[in-house]
């Protein structure tokens, strides 16, 4: 916890093994002010809560140059960012796994003009609510270069934007919904 200006990871954030049902590592938690976080590689979850980024309510941009991939553990390969104010950039795809809520981004209560970009697909997995982007309020623009693909898990492979006061400025999906 505490205040940090920027966080940069030169490679990937790789979660630990799900062997034996253990909780994996490779987690980042920031409670204070954060200007930006960049992961040059991917978020690769496996065990429960592994490859997970949890940010507080006062921060700027989040950039993952590769993919966000969930594993068999619940909430593996995830970003939980209730106060994202600037931008979310995912260079690759968001892919759910076998765990509940794996391979997902939760940006509830975004406080600013949030611009969202995903360079690949948003795809569900076997886990319920896997491969999901869920945002409430403050979203100004959404661009998905790929497709939105449902998985075997209940309500997996979806984008949910709940704008209680207004609709996002634009939503561009270049691929299919299937």
Image: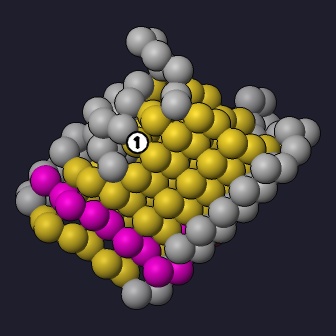
Judged from this view, the residue extending furthest toward the front is: 169
Secondary structure under the numbered disc 1 in the rendered image: strand
| Residue beneath disc 1 | 114
Q: Is residue 142 left or right of residue 64?
A: right
Quadrant of the image occupied by residue 42: bottom right
Q: How is the image coloured?
A: secondary structure
Q: Quadrant of the N terminus?
A: bottom left
- The percent coordinates of residue 98 (x first, y second) are 73, 51
What residue do we see at 20% from left, 61% from top? 35
Q: Which residues are magenta?
A: 33-44
Q: On the picture, is 26 further left or further right than 4? A: right
Residue at the spot x=27%, y=54% of the render? 60
Q: Position of residue 120 (x, y in %)?
A: 72, 61
Q: Residues within 10 Å of mark 1 (few under 14, many from 20)?
A: many
Which one is in front, 135 or 140?
140
Residue 35 part of the magenta-drawn span: yes
The picture places residue 34, in percent across and down from the top left corner, at 19, 58
For image coordinates 9% across by 59% down, the residue present is 3
Q: Which x, y percent locates residue 163? A: 48, 19
Residue closer to the observer: 101 or 68: 68
Q: Quadrant of residue 56?
A: top left
Residue farthest along the top direction in this orientation: 165
Q: In the rendered view, tell whether residue 114 sits above or below residue 119.
A: above
The C terminus - image quarter: top right
The relative height of residue 176 versus residue 97 in the rendered view (above or below) is: above
Horizontal side of 67 relative to 124 (left or right) equals left
């Amino acid at each position: 916890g505490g205040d940090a200006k920027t966080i940069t990871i030169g490679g990937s954030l790789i979660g630990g093994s799900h062997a034996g049902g253990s909780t994996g590592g490779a987690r980042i938690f920031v409670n204070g002010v954060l200007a930006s976080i960049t992961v040059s590689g991917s978020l690769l979850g496996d065990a429960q809560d592994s490859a997970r980024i949890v940010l507080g309510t006062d921060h700027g941009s989040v950039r993952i140059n590769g993919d966000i991939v969930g594993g068999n553990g619940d909430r593996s390969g995830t970003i939980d960012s209730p106060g994202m104010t600037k931008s979310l950039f995912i260079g690759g795809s968001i892919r759910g796994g076998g765990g509940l809520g794996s391979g997902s981004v939760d940006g509830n209560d975004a406080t600013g003009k949030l611009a969202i970009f995903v360079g690949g697909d948003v795809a569900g997995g076997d886990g319920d609510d896997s491969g999901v982007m869920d945002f409430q309020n403050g979203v100004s623009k959404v661009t998905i270069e790929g497709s939105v693909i449902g998985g075997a898990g209940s309500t997996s492979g979806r984008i949910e934007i709940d704008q209680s006061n207004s609709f996002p400025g634009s939503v561009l999906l270049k691929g299919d919904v299937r």
